Image (cartoon, rainbow, N blue to C red):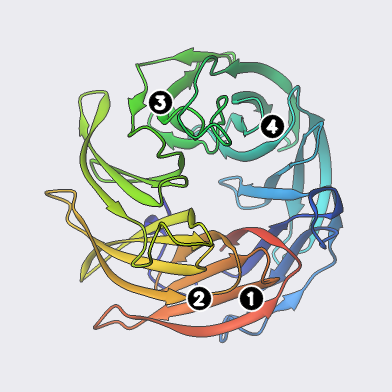
Amino acid sequence: MDSSVSANPLSASRLVVGAYTSEMDGTAVGLSSYQLSSDDPSGLVARPVVEMASPSWVVAHPSQDTVYAIGEQDPAQVHAIGIGEDATLTPLNASALSDGAACHLAITEDARHLVVAHYGKGSVASFAINPDRTVGEQIDSYTFHNWTGPDWARQAGPHAHQVVMDGDGFWIPNLGGDVVHRLSLDGDGRFVSLVAPVELPAGSGPRHLVLVGDLMVVACELSAELWVGQRDGDTYRQVALVPSTYRDRRAEPRIYPSGIGARTTERGTEVLVANRGCDTVAAFDLDLTTGEPTLRQEFATTGWPRDLKVHGDRLWIAGQTGDRIATYVADPTSGEWKPDFAFDAATPACILLLR
């Protein structure tokens, strides 16, 4: 999770921004990258954009010399891109996915495979990472069949929305079925179902989650809530369910929680969630003993905050319709978040920070 990064806000020297291009009603042309100043992170140096269709999620290889992006077009692709110390991007190769509407990907802890989530079909796909960091052909696919929910406009079928690595397996929130699945890969990169899924309230629509100690905190897109589960053997049991915002969740426009992150400081553990619709960020103090999140601060941010990254005492927000990346810094004593700097970015969808 993001809280594991250094507390030094300048420990990141490179920034990669995934975005939506024209086939997804975006205005970007591909994947952007920036070199950050060691003295002042607002001193961004933009590098040439790598053109590709809607690279909406990006992850870094542990070596930090390669990033992987999924193109959310149909059919979808996984791209391997080299990244230099000055943040210059160099395309390496791309591999086709059997399904479309890919929305998220993650690297296994041994860095041998990529796992991609497909929102549209409610499936996941696996790929090998070659020794030269390029991506191999698709190895396997696993579909979460027959999962639906009461919100028929959004839950007529399964929608895999994220992949979160955890030990020898990974968790996949299924927005369409109100569950979080756990799978693993065998030695050949094929999927193995480990346990029964974690069940969330009907109509909650789990989108993204973070793991904090023995707690799982889930941003529920359809109910505008945070669900907290306590680890119980090989599953999680609910210990808290709270609104993701101070705002009236019954009012228009509808509120859709999206990005979620966590950090641990001397003050304790904090969970942050971006709320699209009301366009805010909510900061919760999380009690690691009871699992209870307490909303401490909520502040306005850029339009349709799709992604959120916590990096030390700095918070980065990608505003998809605001065409902007906004940053905030936390007061070291009170923990209150205050605006820092912002810059224009065409329909940003994902933020990746590298050392």
Circle 4 is placed at which residue position? 131
SS of the residue under disc 2? loop
Q: Is residue 242 left or right of residue 162?
A: left
Circle 2 is placed at which residue position? 10
Alpha carbon distance from label 4 to label 1: 29 Å
Q: Is residue 124 left or right of residue 271?
A: right
Q: Residue at x 60, y 38 (%)?
A: 105
Crowding near the residue tagged with mark 2, few <14, some 14–19, many ≥20 C-alpha atoms within 10 Å: some
Q: Residue at x 49, y 20 (%)?
A: 147
Q: Disc 2 or 4, which lies upstream in sequence?
A: 2
For the residue pair 216 and 121, the one nearer the viewer reads as: 121
Q: Is residue 263 left or right of residue 130?
A: left
Q: Disc 1 or 3, which lies upstream in sequence?
A: 1
- Which quarter of the figure has residue 133? top right
Q: Looking at the image, is mark 2 or mark 4 nearer the viewer?
A: 2
Crowding near the residue tagged with mark 3, few <14, some 14–19, many ≥20 C-alpha atoms within 10 Å: few
Viewport quadrant of the C terminus:
bottom right
Check residue 168 in the rendering and tell me which mark sits there, or answer none.
3
